[in-house]
Amino acid sequence: MTARPKIQVEVVSRSFGDSGNRVLALKDINLTVREGEFVSIVGPSGCGKSTLLYMLGGFVAPTSGRLLADGQPIVAPGIDRGIVFQEYALFPWLTVFDNIAYGLEMTGVPAAKRQQAVEHYISLIGLKGFEQRYPRELSGGMKQRVALARTFAYEPSILLLDEPFGALDSLTRETMQDELRRLWATTGKTILMVTHDVDEAVYLSNRVCVMSQRPGRVVEEFAIDLDRDGPREDVVLSDAYTATHNAVWLSVRRQVSNPPAPAS
Ligand SMILES: Nc1ncnc2c1ncn2[C@@H]1O[C@H](COP(=O)(O)OP(=O)(O)OP(=O)(O)O)[C@@H](O)[C@H]1O
Ligand SMILES: [Mg+2]
């Protein structure tokens, strides 16, 4: 049985600016993500990937077309959609602990369970001892880890991730990727992730969508069918992984080599 659509993007366009310096970021983009799918979006810088996630998050409205979550039009941010921004947005007035606890509080998780979940995530992201620090006291990678923990901890049914591991060193990146994989495998969340990293997209997702240069649209899709039960090295050293990776990488290269549309 095919799962029901969780996210629907229907003929969506979005432009910025006014006549004279108008930029058409996205043009007539269509995308359906079904319940429990993990979809990655890769594409050239500036093609509208973040804009698409902001629209799904309810932070930016489309110029035309419509976006739905669970069949309902998206008009504002909602607790059902957890977003990790490209530039880790933490609440500067809250400590690390309270930033991570925030979503749990919003969803009514009782204090004892909240404490447990926050402690679990603090230790997972390697920030034990930093519970009472404020975001201004953290490095970029530390802030990004807190932003990830904050979103993972309250387990929204849809996760929108904009280059969530971009600022991390490679070992922390792998730990967080595996945590995301575990979260997805055990909770059946619907995940839409933007990434520049073809390896990351192929390693984690069921489907990779390749976007064109601006104005961005989905030009190619790859279904990823890998046996992911084993450890990371077994997955990434398999022939199936290499073949899929190369196909996606070539597709992205074809897009990057086209020039984007000029601003009008
Ligand atoms: N608030 C804004 N005001 C004006 N132009 C914007 C705004 N947000 C995005 N744009 C423009 O829309 C286009 C798409 O931007 P977006 O940030 O969505 O790209 P992206 O694919 O996420 O790029 P990157 O991979 O570099 O993060 C760009 O040309 C950008 O200049
Ligand atoms: Mg972006």
Image: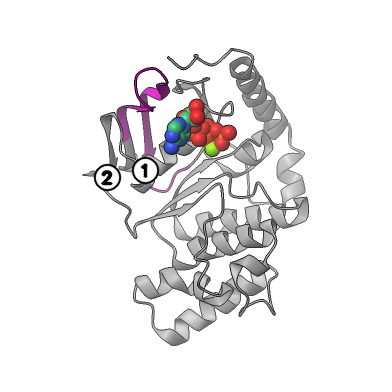
Which residue is tagged 1? 56
SS label for mark 2:
loop
Mark 1, other Cα within 10 Å: few <14 / some 14–19 / many ≥20: many
> Hey, what amino acid is under mark 2?
Ile
Q: Locate residue 160 relative to residue 165 in the image: left or right.
A: left
Most extreme residue toward the bottom is: 112
Quarter assignment of residue 4: top left
The picture places residue 72, in percent across and down from the top left corner, at 22, 45
Q: Is residue 250 magenta?
A: no
Q: Is residue 18 magenta?
A: yes
On screen, residue 21 above or below 226: above
Magenta stretch in the rendered image: 9-38
- Looking at marks 1 and 2 on the same chain, the residue that comes earlier in the sequence is marked by 1
Mark 2, other Cα within 10 Å: few <14 / some 14–19 / many ≥20: many
Most extreme residue toward the front is: 20
The picture places residue 99, in percent across and down from the top left corner, at 51, 70
For image coordinates 55% across by 60% down, the residue present is 147
Residue 146 visible to an observer of this rendering: yes
Q: Locate residue 176 relative to residue 18 in the image: left or right.
A: right
For the residues bearing labels 1 and 2, Cβ distance under 8 angstroms: yes
For image coordinates 44% across by 67% down, the residue present is 154
Towards the viewer: 141 or 15: 15
Q: Which mark is residue 74?
A: 2
The picture places residue 222, in percent across and down from the top left corner, at 53, 27
The picture places residue 163, in percent across and down from the top left corner, at 58, 44
Image mark count? 2
